[in-house]
Every structure is written in C-alpha cells, then in structure tokens.
C-alpha cells in the first residue's frame, strides 16, 4: 500500500545524512562530553561542532546556544527562567501548550499573564502588545509560526516594542526553523526555542538561544552543563543530529527549497478549493510558513476525515499532535473566531524535505472523494442540501 506522510508539523523523519552523522555516537564514540579523557573530548568536540551549526542557523554566537530535550523544555526554560513571582508576562492565546501551560503554572505561583487575542487570520496585533505593557511586565512570549495554521507573527515589530520597553522577548520558533530564515538580531529576541524533530533531527533534542549576559534561572539542579543553564549529561547523538539537521536547513535555503515547498502547498490548496465546495484555508491572507495548509471542509468532522485518509494511506492531522483525540476543538482556530463546527471540520497538511509533487497529487486524488463520501453520511450536510 502506498503511504504518504503529510504530518511533518507533528514530527519529521530523520534524514539519512542526520542518521549517518549520529550513528558513531551510539557506538565507538560513546563518551561523556564532560570527561577529560580521549572519549570525553571526542564527544565534547562533536557537541561544540553541533553548537556552531545551530548558531549558524539562528544567526547567534555559539555561547548563546543551550541544548535541551526539545521544544517544550526550551519554552519552559525561557518562560520560567526569565519571569519570577510578581512579574507580568504577555503572551498570545494561540501559543503551543508548552508556552500556555508554562504561563498558567507561573500564574499559580504569583506571576500575572495577559493572553492577547488574534484576528481572523490568526495574527497578533503588535499594538496590543504595546497596550498590554505594565510597569511590572518582564517578558513577552509570542510564537514565530503557529503549529496548526503556519501563520507567521510580526515578531520583528514585537521584538522592537519589547526592546523599547526594556522587557525580555522570547519567541517559540519550533515551527519556523528550517522553513523561514531565522536571525535573532533582526527579531531582537532575548530567547528563541527550536526542536530537533521538527527539522529532521530526532525526537528528544532541542535548543534555546539565550542572548549573551541574559540570566535564565535553570529548571534543573545538577552539574554545570551548558554553562550552568541546563544541568544534565548532554544527549550527544541527539545534539549531533540537531547540528547536522541545522546544517541541512541552512543549505536548503541556499537551494530555495522553501520556495519549492510553497509551490507544493499552493498546488494542494488550489486543487482542494477548486474541487471541494464549502472549503477554505484557515489563516489565508496572513504570511505563512511554506509547509503548512490548514483547511476546513464544512459539514464534516476532522477526526473521521483523518481516519478515512489514513486507511487509504495518507497521514494528515486535525491539528496539534498532542491534542489529537482531544474532544475540545482547536484553541488556535477558536481564537481566530472560527465557529466550533468549522474548527472541528479543519484538517492540517504539512510537508517536509522528503515530500514530492507526487505526494501532493496523491493527496488530491483522495481528499475531494473522501470529503464527498463523509458529507453523504453527514445529516447536517444532507439537511442543508435538501433546503436549497
Ligand atoms: N512549540 C511548538 C510551536 C510546537 O509545534 C511544538 C511541538 O509540536 C512544541 C513547541 C514542543 O516541541 P517538542 O515536541 O520538541 O517538545
């Protein structure tokens, strides 16, 4: 059976070059990067080489890269590490739960938080950030690209507002990395999160950029790893994989792979909209990353759609992987003002480096038929059709 994977915002396959780079560190190069002997030094050199590659992807200094266990830890380290009881945090209502729940937890421990709304395209208004500033505001945390819609936030403008107000700015760039060029100086952020498994490195590794001289309170207590910002023996194979994936991401921009990906995205969206009535793209009209399409199909439910497509070999999702199976409709789509039934009727398609134009054609051969069949079974759709 042909299988096509268009759920790369959930996770991406590890690229063969990344696996090749990692392999020795599971075997003969097994050292602990903190050991002073040959084996340790070999591991240390690999970690520092990977740090250079990640710094090149982010446009920062090598000492500003802190390796973590992934996007969730990076977000938590940035938020809990920069804000303390009594401080006010500004974030948005469409953040990943790694940010939202970290902020909620800090509220329980004496912080205040403002969750900014978004417009119908899913965009935060930078003026709302300015208006939300208070004398005790310590941190603004607004994501760069949304994981469900791919909508890109005006982070440069928000970074400028935060800098002028002398408050920290963190951006969750987990879904932006590898899809749009990153440059921490242009964004003027103090912290930026990325995750390995969204850019073809393995799951369980990530990084946080922390601007030079910015003190983050660590989440864990232990050794002096990562310049005392993240205790715990480094995940050397994972870090090597992240470094290689960062190199490949930089090379990809040189080859304009991002443009090729946006061609696939546009072909899928145009194909669907031309063939499926009462469908539309969530976040259309806003700047978006080139690999994500979030499409609503009125009068169906996203969950059975995902299952039907999976049975035919196409893997897509209804939104964030960690909320699949949740009864609640997407908090992101609801924040954009979608009706509950439309939020439930939305499906996310997301591309990776391994996908081809044949994959798009495969999706187009299945999606319109599947929607038509589900609508035939839908009492809501039949009632609407009969009343015409
Ligand atoms: N932030 C965003 C925007 C994400 O999409 C994700 C994962 O889906 C995360 C954070 C969490 O990253 P990780 O899975 O590496 O913990």
Image: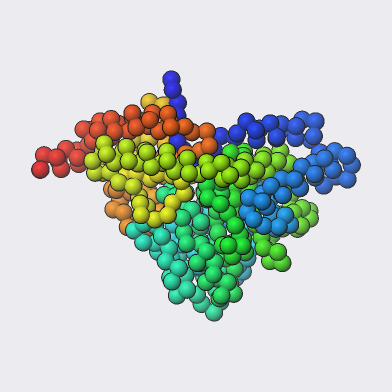
Q: Closest to the observer: 384 or 162?
A: 162
Residue 254 to residue 312: above or below: below
Where the C terminus falls, by quadrant? top left
Q: Residue furthest bottom?
A: 135
Q: Place residue 361 in its image quadrant.
A: top left
Q: Please state if 264 lies on the left or on the right of 85 as rendered.
A: left
Q: Place residue 347 in its image quadrant.
A: top left
Where the N terminus falls, by quadrant? top left
Q: Please state if 14 lies on the left or on the right of 229 as rendered.
A: left
Q: Please state if 64 lies on the left or on the right of 303 as rendered.
A: right
Residue 383 to residue 145: above or below: above
Residue drawn at the location 60% of the way across and 34% of the way down: 15
Q: Closest to the observer: 75 or 13?
A: 13
In the rendered image, is residue 241 in sight? Answer: yes
Q: Position of residue 353 (x, y in %)?
A: 53, 37
Q: Residue furthest front?
A: 255
Q: Position of residue 47 (x, y in %)?
A: 75, 45
In the rendered image, is residue 203 in sight? Answer: no
Q: In this figure, which colouring scheme has been used for the structure?
A: rainbow
Q: Closest to the observer: 32 or 222?
A: 32
Residue drawn at the location 89% of the way across and 42% of the way down: 37
Residue drawn at the location 19% of the way across and 40% of the way down: 381
């Amino acid at each position: 059976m042909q299988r096509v994977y268009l759920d790369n915002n959930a996770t991406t396959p590890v690229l063969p070059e990344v696996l090749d780079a990692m392999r020795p560190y599971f075997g003969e190069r097994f050292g602990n990067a903190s050991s002073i002997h040959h084996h340790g030094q070999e591991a240390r050199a690999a970690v520092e080489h990977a740090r250079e590659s990640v710094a090149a992807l982010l446009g920062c200094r090598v000492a500003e890269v802190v390796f973590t266990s992934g996007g969730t830890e990076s977000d938590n380290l940035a938020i809990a590490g920069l804000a303390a009881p009594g401080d006010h945090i500004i974030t948005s209502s469409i953040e990943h739960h790694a940010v939202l729940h970290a902020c909620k937890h800090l509220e329980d421990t004496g912080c205040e938080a403002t969750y900014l709304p978004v417009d119908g395209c899913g965009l935060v208004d930078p003026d709302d950030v300015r208006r939300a500033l208070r004398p005790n505001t310590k941190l603004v945390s607004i994501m760069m690209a949304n994981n469900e819609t791919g909508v890109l936030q005006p982070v440069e403008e928000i970074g400028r507002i935060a800098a002028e107000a002398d408050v920290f700015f963190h951006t969750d760039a987990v879904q932006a990395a590898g899809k749009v060029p990153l440059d921490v100086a242009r964004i003027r952020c103090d912290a930026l999160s990325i995750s390995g498994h969204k850019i073809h490195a393995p799951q369980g590794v990530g990084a946080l950029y922390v601007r030079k001289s910015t003190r983050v309170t660590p989440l864990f207590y232990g050794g002096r790893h990562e310049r005392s910002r993240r205790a715990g023996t480094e995940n050397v194979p994972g870090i090597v994989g992240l470094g290689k994936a960062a190199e490949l991401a930089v090379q990809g921009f040189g080859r304009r792979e991002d443009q090729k990906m946006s061609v696939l995205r546009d072909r899928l969206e145009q194909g669907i909209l031309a063939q499926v009535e009462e469908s539309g793209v969530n976040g259309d009209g806003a700047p978006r990353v080139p690999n994500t399409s979030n499409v609503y199909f009125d009068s169906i439910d996203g969950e059975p759609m995902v299952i039907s497509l999976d049975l035919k070999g196409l893997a897509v999702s209804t939104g964030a992987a960690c909320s699949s199976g949740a009864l609640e409709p997407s908090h992101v789509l609801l924040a954009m003002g979608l009706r509950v039934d439309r939020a439930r009727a939305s499906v996310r398609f997301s591309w990776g480096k391994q996908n081809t134009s044949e994959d798009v054609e495969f999706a187009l051969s299945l999606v319109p038929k599947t929607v038509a069949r589900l609508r035939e079974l839908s009492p809501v759709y039949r009632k609407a059709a009969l009343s015409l």
